[in-house]
Image (cartoon, grey):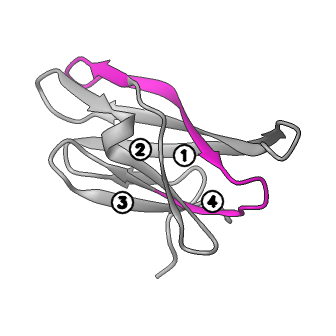
């Protein structure tokens, strides 16, 4: 079975995700360079109640060397059955190659989405 990738709907219990894009930009100078990776994701609340989804607690990116990076935090308030397009931001070393993101629902169920699809 292949891993979900761009455009695939993944169910993480109380929320679903569709990763639509990932892009990186290297910035900095004088040896202080970083790669800023933005992952665009559609998040939908699958429950009948409002939920709060926190990117810093629920989204990580892993590079091809197995190093994991946490999303820079922001909270998304999702009313019952509502969806929202969000930008998840990660800071990596300039030479890191993103492999996949792990996205977790508020119930703890995690889904992995490949960024090499």
Q: Which residue is mark 2?
A: 17
In-image side of 31 versus 21 (left or right): right
Instruction: State which quarter of the image contains the C terminus.
Output: bottom right
State whether residue 52 is above or below residue 10.
above
Label 2 crowd bin: few (<14), some (14–19), many (20+), radius 10 Å:
many
The Cα–Cα distance between marks 3 and 4, rounded to whole angstroms, is: 13 Å
The Cα–Cα distance between marks 1 and 4, rounded to whole angstroms, is: 9 Å
**Residue 113, how many percent across, how many down?**
50, 60
Q: Which residue is mark 4?
A: 115
Label 1 crowd bin: few (<14), some (14–19), many (20+), radius 10 Å:
many
Q: Which residue is mark 3?
A: 111
Identify the mark at residue 99; answer none if there is no mark: none
Q: Tell me if label 2 and label 1 are in contact, CB under 8 Å.
A: yes
As drawn, which residue projects farthest toward the bottom? 1
Q: Tell me if label 3 and label 4 are in contact, CB under 8 Å.
A: no
**Residue 39, how many percent across, how many down?**
60, 41
Q: Tell me if label 2 and label 3 are in contact, CB under 8 Å.
A: yes
**Residue 51, how many percent across, how many down?**
19, 26
Displayed quadrant of residue 58? top left
Secondary-structure class at tag 4:
loop
Q: Tell me if label 1 and label 4 are in contact, CB under 8 Å.
A: yes
Badge 3 or badge 1: first in the primary sequence: 1
Displayed quadrant of residue 98? bottom right
Identify the mark at residue 19; answer none if there is no mark: 1
* Magenta region, residue range: 75-101
């Amino acid at each position: 079975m292949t891993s979900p990738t761009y455009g695939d709907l993944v169910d993480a219990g109380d929320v679903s995700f569709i990763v639509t894009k990932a892009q990186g930009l290297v910035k900095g100078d004088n040896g202080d360079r970083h790669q800023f990776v933005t992952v665009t994701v559609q998040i939908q609340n699958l429950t009948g109640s409002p939920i709060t989804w926190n990117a810093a607690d629920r989204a990580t990116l892993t590079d091809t060397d197995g190093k994991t990076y946490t999303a820079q935090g922001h909270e998304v308030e999702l009313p019952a059955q509502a969806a929202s397009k969000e930008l998840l931001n990660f800071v990596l070393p300039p030479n890191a190659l993103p492999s996949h993101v792990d996205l977790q629902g508020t119930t703890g169920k995690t889904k992995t989405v490949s960024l090499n699809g």
